[in-house]
Amino acid sequence: MKPILHIINNPDDTQAIEMIKIQWKDNAYGVAAVFAGEIPSVLPSMPDVRICVLREDALEKPGFEVIGYYDLLNLIFSVETITVW
């Protein structure tokens, strides 16, 4: 099995955040969340989730892994499932 990827356009989408929290508790293979577009000012508490933002959208904010579009493509092809919110 491979990890699960969530691409989030709206950081205030509570349904997306709740689903990610459920999945990281139940998934032994990992969960990644990429914030595309608007970047949240405060990270939701998800300690075992890989949280990324696109380099082109990122300001210097602690707690995010900054990735480029090429990195995002590699991530997309390395996961089991993708959900776009």
Image: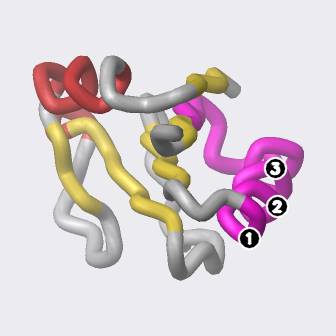
* Local secondary structure at mark 1: helix
Residue at image coords 18%, 64%: 60
Give how far across and how far down residue 14 sits, in percent. 84, 51
Q: Is residue 46 above or below residue 79?
A: below
The amino acid type found where label 1 is placed reads Lys
Residue 65: mark: none
Residue type at tag 2: Ile
- The dot on residue 25 is 1
Residue 9 sits inside the magenta stretch: yes
Closest to the camera, between mark 1 and mark 3, is: 1
Q: Position of residue 70 (x, y in %)?
A: 12, 21
**Residue at figure coordinates x 30%, y 31% from the top left:** 75
Tell me whether the residue at label 2 lies in contact with that at label 1, contact meaning CB atoms closer than 8 angstroms. yes
Q: Residues within 10 Å of mark 1 (few under 14, many from 20)?
A: few
Asked whether 73 or 2 is in front, the reply is 2
Disc 3 marks a residue whose amino acid type is: Met
For disc 3, the marked residue is 19
What residue is shown with label 2? 22
3 vs 68: above or below: below
Q: Which residues are magenta?
A: 6-26
Q: Is residue 55 left or right of residue 85?
A: left
- Secondary structure mostly seen in magenta is helix
Q: Is residue 16 left or right of residue 15?
A: left
Q: Quadrant of the C terminus?
A: top right
> Do tag 3 and tag 2 residues touch (Cβ < 8 Å)?
yes
Dividing the picture into quarters, in which one does residue 63 lie? bottom left
Q: Earlier in the sequence, mark 1 or mark 3?
A: 3
In the rendered image, residue 22 lying in the magenta stretch gets the answer yes
